[in-house]
Image: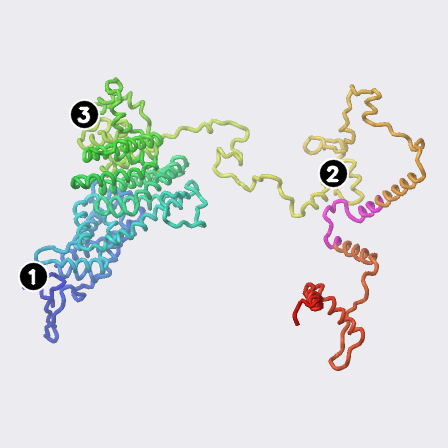
Amino acid sequence: MYNSAMATILPLDRLVVEVVDAHTGAAHRVPALHPRWKVERRFVAYRPLPPEGCPVALHEWVERLRFLTSDLDWLLKQPHPRFWSQVVFDEDLHKSLDSYVRLVPRAYDGAMDRGGACGGKCSKQGACEPCNLQTQLHRQVFMVYLRMSTNRESKECFLSTEAFAEVIYNNFLFDVPKILDLCALYGRGNGALLSKMIGNIFKKQPAYLSDLEESIPTILQVFDMIAGKCGVTSHVWSDGFPQKLTGQASHSTATIPDLELKDLLQYLCDVATTLFAFLDVYPAAAAAFLQQDALSRISGFYEIVVPEMEKVLTQTNFEDKELQDELCRLLVTSQRRLLGVSHAVISACCLQPLLDARTEQVQDVVEEYLNVVMTLLQQHRFLADFDELYPIADDISIMQQASPSLDETRISYVLDAVREARQSAGSKRPSQHPQHMANCDEDSPAAAKRSSIAIQNFNGSEDAEPDHESVSRGVELGGVELASLVCGIRDLFPELGDGFIEAGLHAFNYDSESLVSRLLDDTLPDQLKGLDRSMPKMEENKVPSLLAERRGVFDGDEFDVFSRDSVDLARVHKGKRPAGPGGWRSVLADRSGVTGPSRERYAPYGLVCDEEEEEPGLPGAGGVRDYDDEYDDTYDTGHVCANDGDADDDVLARRPFVTPRVLQTRSREDRNVASNYEVEEDNEDKNKSVFAQERPRDDFVMDPAVLRERMAARRETFMANRGHRGGANQAVRGVGRGQGQSHETTVQRRRKEENKSKRGNHNRRAGASSKLRRGMIPS
């Protein structure tokens, strides 16, 4: 029995309730925050929306949402003591809330942005049961966390500050990942309540701030991991962190599969969006990111990885165009959020303190801002994109107003570096350098025309039409740049379709500010009013390829890569084709191509077989005469022509004169030497002929066993002809002790004793004897 009557107003952690046992009637006191008051109730876990085309899974998902909404509605209706007893001691409730926070689709996922849970099949939000349940559950989860973050609900229902901090921290009602997820889910439409809620958590429990500072390096390591997957590394964000020598990626961004690239971009977009939402809701945490050097890590990652991904998305020919558009949207969202995180840190740490700082603190804040900007000047791409969204010249103007004694040299250096970065990155927006703006010719007709167009667009006049001449001169945007503009407008107007936004941007010369102004004032031109606002992106009209007009004799064959996507690579061989199973011997033994007189020469030996006998000289089966390779090409190398020189000098030059042997006069010794030389040459010729008879002509690699036998026989002959060397073995073997020794043994031992100084002790014994004889050693 629970007595809800409370005579004394005490905090919940010190409140004690008197309970009477129904069986014994004994009364005992139980704390108001106790597991006894927990109700056994099954809280089911949340699951994501099932894919389309599966009605059974959708029905199960709807039933699960019904249970969840019913349970959370019951929980929110509980009184203060029972609510806290349930949320503190019920593990199933913790798992259910955690599953929703982790698995519910985010705004950038595209699954719940238009049409709610039904995927856009209903005309209005909440017109079908899945949309109603999803919206109701989303609100109830937020209300549960909002109530858990409040220690005082009323004058009677409250927790003491110390007990509240201990309860939410020790029972893991909140932690840093959960706080980040709550900001990503509810920071867009409930920023004020969420900011108050998270501020109260960090204020009442300072341990969460320490946990945040410890988790920032882990969060920043995500950028290192993504860079490693893309095959790029840089010292910009890895200073002070050990790098694996064996962990260098051997692949690049261009070799990443499409699905893996999509996972990387979704991961990057999730991290960037979560950090941006958290710093937007709780700007006080920006100081921790600035101390951890997060700006240098983010800018270094942005400088190297983002251009690589842009190059892949723009230069790769994706088979699935919808996948390519989705990847571009994810990359653009990630870029905007990373730049937003950097601006949030700079704004919270350097710009906002100027409004609250005293006179003596202004100079320190300005110096901090200049130091932060100076660290970003080397990242040209990041600096150009950052200045595109958040102009640095505007921030410097605020600094100059707050501190008139600001160093103009440093200001000029920073603005010049920003202008050079924008020029190198090819940015479209003109630089905001004050000096260059002052030097512009504002009285020129072109400047006046641009100003008038800008004023007309700004005023939003319904009669003002865009200047078609300027539109025709403008650059047609596409790919990542167009996706960036579409994503920015969709953040403000989620109900608009991509096709409608692109049509509006094209009508206003890709000026997103003018389009947003017209949408807010509802003053769109007539050509846009007639369009469906939820119109999806239209497929581009593909220009017929010039290859379709190509004509050739090989069109449509099995190796025509222009007409087919796949080619049988087994039919393609590069280089020398290897021999068949028989090797080169079978190729040399093949006599199937022998024809003519040579065929008759090989026939008695059985080297050719007559499969189809044809008379020589007659046409073959193909109507073409057989090739006869019996042409004698012995004298083809001689230059024979009608203009050969017949002079005696030419003949002698080609064939020198030789004296006949009978006319030569030689001595007897010369004739003997010549005869001996001729005999040796005859013997060598005979040996060569014998060797040629023993070894087949095609045996150019001799059997190793035969070579070893010949080498062994040659060595035995050589050793037998060397003659006798050395004498008998002079080593003698003595007899046992006590039997006496022979004369030979005594002589050999004496010789050993005398001669061992030549080998073992390096003549030390003889030297010692010589010194002893000369009396050099005292006795």
Instruction: Determine which residue is flagged by label 2.
Output: 594
Residue pictured at 24% horizontal, 20% vertical = 442
Residue 677: x percent and y percent?
87, 42
For the C terminus, the image quarter is: bottom right
Instruction: Determine which residue is flagged by label 1.
Output: 9
Q: Which amino acid type is shown beneath numbered disc 3?
A: Glu
> What is the magenta range?
685-707
Q: How far apart are marks 1 and 3 (CA)?
A: 64 Å
Mark 3: secondary structure: loop
Q: How far apart are marks 2 and 3 (CA)?
A: 94 Å
Instruction: Determine which residue is flagged by label 3.
Output: 462
Where 568 sits versus 644, above or below? below
- Residue 571 is at least partly visible in this image: yes
Of residues 694 and 506, which is closer to you in this image?
A: 694
Query: Residue lying furthest bottom in this view?
Result: 738
Residue 287: x percent and y percent?
24, 46
Mark 1: secondary structure: loop
Badge nearest the viewer, 1 or 2? 1
- Residue 534 is at least partly visible in this image: no
Residue 476: x percent and y percent?
33, 27
Residue 152: x percent and y percent?
12, 55
